[in-house]
Amino acid sequence: MIIKIVTDKISKAELEEIAKEFFIGMIKVVVDVKKEIMAVGGELHVDANQVLIENGSKQQDIWGISIYFSKPAEDWIEFFSLINIRPKEKNFSQDIESREIREKIKNIVNKLVVE
């Protein structure tokens, strides 16, 4: 299983190539909003989640999203994952409910993913 931690930049083409292992047109992504890094790939968000934990991330800083390549950049992020259910962090659903966290994630993704 290919899961890559992105700390600098990754091209959209490379993301699409990694995604092909399990999906066409989308990729599972887990973002560490504190370290401003992300793990991409895997079949489930929990796969990438585990890789980030093993590399020093803390669960409370990690959120699951999916990126849909065919959507325009302003709409290509879906903030929905089982790993987002966090009653301790006041997130009671699979959607990321905090606008602040959503904005952080958008900024991180836009900084790391390049054409």
Image (cartoon, rainbow, N blue to C red):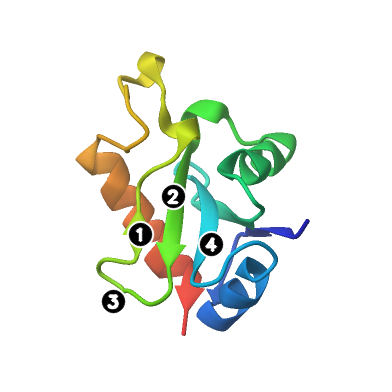
Measured Cα–Cα span from mark 1 to mark 3: 9 Å
Within 10 Å of disc 4 (Cα), the crowding (few <14, some 14-19, many 20+) is many
Q: Residue at x 33, y 28 (%)?
A: 93
In this view, 89 is above or below 73 = above
Q: Which of 8 and 75 is in front in this view?
A: 75
Looking at the image, do the residues carrying marks 2 and 1 touch, with CB atoms under 8 Å apart?
yes
Within 10 Å of disc 1 (Cα), the crowding (few <14, some 14-19, many 20+) is many
Q: Which mark is residue 77?
A: 1
Comes first in the chain, label 3 or label 4: 4
Comes first in the chain, label 1 or label 3: 3
Comes first in the chain, label 1 or label 4: 4
Q: Name the residue under label 4.
A: 27
Q: Which residue is drawn at 37% across and 51% down?
A: 105
Q: Name the residue under label 3.
A: 72
Under mark 4, the amino acid is Ile
Q: Give the secondary structure at mark 4.
A: strand
**What x and y, as percent, mark residue 64?**
47, 43
Measured Cα–Cα span from mark 4 to mark 2: 9 Å
Q: Give the secondary structure at mark 3.
A: loop
Is residue 104 left or right of 100 when viewed as pictured? right
Measured Cα–Cα span from mark 3 to mark 4: 15 Å
Split into 4 quadrants, where in the image is the N terminus?
bottom right
